[in-house]
Amino acid sequence: MISLPPNERDLHAYVDHQLSEADRHVLDTWLASHPDEAAQVRAWQQDAQHLRAALGGALQQPANPDLDPSLIRQRLKRQSRRQWASAAVLLIAVSLGGVGGWKARDMTVFHPPAPMTDALQAYRLIAQQGLLPADYKVDGDGDIQRWLDRYFTQANRLPDLSRAGFSPVSGRLLSTDEGPAAMVMYEDRSGHKVSFYVRPPGPKNTFLPRGSRQDGDLQAEYWSGKGYNYAMVSPTDTPAAKMLKQSLSF
């Protein structure tokens, strides 16, 4: 049973239809006499509808071969065969002993994904390939910080990249294995793009030390703070990468 006045968790549960009928009726009655809170709830409901519509629209985008179910099954079968083969090699190596056995063991060690791989994938998908439309576009009166705060209320403020010549132009909500994420796109006058990416640390509560890594033609600067993981992603073949790194004091 919820208590009154309701806290923010109760209101979000109301928006997400996660309350019992009795609690929902209590909140309906309370909201009817509190117009300011009712307006906030209606805004959240509209945001949720926009998010569902945006994610639904993503399904209409051109087919991504990497997501084809038959290809995924084939990849899983190949991975399974490789794992069995590695296990067989390990068994033989252990039987024979010596240095060769330890080398075979290294082949079977699981290596976790590199930090913020999802941020790099999101940049490629949205900034480079343009496969997913923006959920929010900055106009003359737009406030993208307010848009981001609707979904990540405790997150760090958006970085100010004006010294590097970049300003925020759009935002996109995403769903990842670690939880909901958001990517804010910045552009300079030449059309170069960099992105600010935020998401929770995931079920394993994996927070990151401040660091940097390169993946192909992209550079990622990553860190953690206030309960979230962050990344700034930029191309490595433009002056933007060096200016961005200086602006973030990495």
Image (cartoon, rainbow, N blue to C red):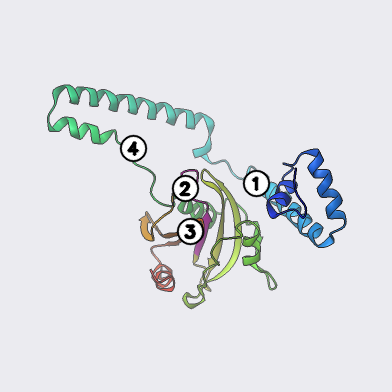
Dot in front, 1 or 2: 2
Is mark 2 in CB contact (under 8 Å) with mark 4? no
Specify whether residue 28 is painted magenta. Answer: no
**Label located before the other in sequence (2 or 4):** 4
Query: In this picture, which residue range is highlighted in magenta?
Result: 194-205
* In front of the other: 209 or 184: 209
Q: Is residue 104 above or below residue 202?
A: above
Residue 22 lies, in percent from the top left, at 81, 40
Q: CA distance from mark 2 to mark 4?
A: 19 Å
Helix, strand or loop at label 3? It is strand
Q: Which residue is mark 2?
A: 205
Is mark 3 in CB contact (under 8 Å) with mark 2? no
Q: Amino acid at mark 1?
A: Leu
* In front of the other: 100 or 227: 227
Q: Which mark is residue 133?
A: none
Q: Which residue is mark 3?
A: 230
Q: Quadrant of residue 16?
A: top right
**Is 70 left, or right, of 95 in this rendering?**
right
Q: Quadrant of residue 182?
A: bottom right
**Is 192 left, or right, of 218 in this rendering?**
right
Residue at the image position 44 percent from the left and 62 percent from the top = 234
Q: Amino acid at mark 3?
A: Tyr
Helix, strand or loop at label 4? It is loop
Q: Which residue is mark 4?
A: 110
Q: Amino acid at mark 2?
A: Asn
**Label located before the other in sequence (1 or 2):** 1
Q: Is residue 2 above or below residue 93?
A: below
Q: CA distance from mark 3 to mark 1?
A: 22 Å
Q: Amino acid at mark 4?
A: Phe
Helix, strand or loop at label 1? It is helix
**Label located before the other in sequence (3 or 1):** 1
